Image: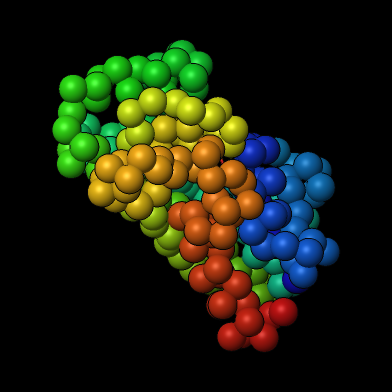
Amino acid sequence: MRLIFATNNNHKLSEIKAILGERFCPYIFTMSDIGVSVNPDENGKTFMENALIKSNALYMEMKNKELLKDGDFIIADDTGLCIKHFNNAPGIFSSRFMGNITQKEKNLKILELMKDLDDTERYAFFITKLVVIEVDKVETDPKILDFEGKIDGYIAKKIEKTDGFGYDPIFAVGDYTDIYKGYVKTFSNLGIDIKNKISHRAKALLLLVEYLEKNHKI
Ligand code: ITT
């Protein structure tokens, strides 16, 4: 079995490896391990469509180059932060949100736009959609599976720590009542080990693990 991840995001990849842990190490492959590279336009209208675009691009590339093997799983992760106050934006536009500015600038801009909001108006969630193309036998049509992970939280009022990636410094886990306790649990504050136990990505990957175990793939 090979679990081949269709991502160009190294932060994401290192989280995936840490979440799956040592047991899965021998089975995890990156695009560069396989010697291929795809970077399709993520022009779908949903997380599911974008994850399918990415996994299918890698599947087709490997098929055309005759690199597929029986027992391959081609996996894409499409993730986004959805903020209620912005009608669930940035959502599928999480990487393109606010155009060509740095992630730090994006995070600061979001805090600025939300600075007058009441604690109860700061709800947000992270969602990960995994689309998995299961190649049982190279010569037969593959199966398409999908798994989802979601975590509720809120947008913090200030950045205390910048560890992690993307929106980690401003997304806090839990609900706004935690704000009153003075304990803001942003993913950056919690640290990567805790994030990887509870995150949207961890939840989605654990469903994949359950599938692999149930079907005796591992
Ligand atoms: P690939 O499509 O190559 O996997 P990407 O960076 O485009 O990489 P996504 O579309 O899934 O991946 O994610 C969009 C952006 O959302 C990403 O660039 C980060 O800024 C942010 N993001 C994704 N996962 C995150 C996480 O766990 N914590 C914080 N921000 C995250």
Question: How many labels sit on residues?
Answer: 0
As displayed, is residue 126 above or below residue 163?
Answer: below
**Whole-percent x, y for residue 61 in the image:** 66, 47
Left or right: 3 with respect to 52? right
Residue at (55, 51) in percent of width and height: 195
Residue at (72, 62) in percent of width and height: 21
**Whole-percent x, y for residue 171 in the image:** 40, 39
- As rendered, which of 18 and 38 lies closer to the eye? 18
Residue at (67, 38) in percent of width and height: 10
Left or right: 106 with respect to 215? left
- As rendered, which of 129 and 32 lies closer to the eye? 129
**Whole-percent x, y for residue 113 in the image:** 25, 20
Q: Quadrant of residue 149?
A: bottom left
As displayed, is residue 183 above or below residue 194?
Answer: above
* Quadrant position of the N terminus in the picture: bottom right
Can residue 87 be seen from the camera position used here?
Answer: no
**Whole-percent x, y for residue 203 in the image:** 49, 63
Left or right: 170 with respect to 61? left
Q: Quadrant of residue 4?
A: bottom right
Q: Quadrant of residue 93?
A: top left
As displayed, is residue 132 above or below residue 167?
Answer: below
- As rendered, which of 63 and 192 lies closer to the eye? 192
